[in-house]
Image: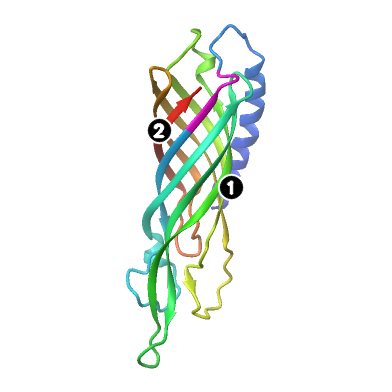
Amino acid sequence: MKRSVFFSAIAICLLLPVAVQGAETDSSSYSVKGRWVVKTSISLYRTWNTGSTVFGTGMRDNGGVGSQRFNFRAEASYAFTRHLEVGLFLGFQNYRYLTYIEPLQPGVVFGEMHNTFAPTFGANVTFQLLPFFVKSDACRWDLYLFARYGGCILPFFEIENFGLEYYFHKYRQEYGVGAGVAYYFKNKVGLFGEWAVGNFSYFPFFTDSNINFRFGIAGKF
């Protein structure tokens, strides 16, 4: 994880100076300056999963495998220069939590599994690459790099009312850098996909997730 944090910090530091330099190049080339992009997308985030209603040890679940559960996101970004966009996002994460049930026999710990959703939010910085190469006034493609930071607030801890001596935070974070591509039909609405490296697990005590894929629908105006 420390390696991912270091990589993210270096990438962000390199990304912003390049964006400023790109904004000062020939203005006759293709530019995204002044446009809005709105996206909705889904991804599978790795979460914890006991695999049963009995929870015994508190060890990392399934050797860090966990279960894949839906992460939905809606975001909007605005381009301040020919290359640089800044945006915000809101969404939700589906996850499970376990509540204590009074055991029928001593020495056995029982729990009941529940499904719920947690709100997510964050910000991203996107650097568009095609203005370096495209000379026409319009382009149906986006090819970009991005840096992202987000948070999640869990309504319930993974293990509720068990009296276990673990120190949990209801606020969890994600962060990473990556690349994406989008194609717009009639230059208005289209599809996009993204690949990123960083931290994409809101359940680091149980499972890690350092690579993420996301896809969805995008519109620009």
Instruction: Look at mark 1 in the image and give the residue it sits on.
Output: 5
Position of 17 relative to 92 (above/below): above
Position of 102 relative to 192 (above/below): below
| Position of residue 169 measured from the top left corner of the image (x, y, whole percent) | 59, 64
In depth, the one of 50 and 35 nearer the eye is 35
Instruction: Look at mark 2 in the image and give the residue it sits on.
Output: 217
Q: From the viewer's perspective, is 13 left or right of 221? A: right
Query: For residue 61, what is the image quadrant?
Result: bottom left
Q: How many marks?
A: 2
Q: Specify whether residue 116 is painted magenta.
A: no
* Callout 1 secondary element: helix
In depth, the one of 140 and 74 nearer the eye is 74
Q: From the viewer's perspective, is 2 left or right of 209? A: right
Q: Residues within 10 Å of mark 2 (few under 14, many from 20)?
A: some
Q: What's drawn in magenta, residue-wise?
A: 32-38
**Mark 2 is on which residue type?**
Ile
Position of 91 relative to 49 (above/below): above
| Position of residue 201 measured from the top left corner of the image (x, y, whole percent) | 48, 54
| Position of residue 56 measured from the top left corner of the image (x, y, whole percent) | 40, 79
Q: Specify whether residue 36 is painted magenta.
A: yes
Q: Residues within 10 Å of mark 1 (few under 14, many from 20)?
A: some
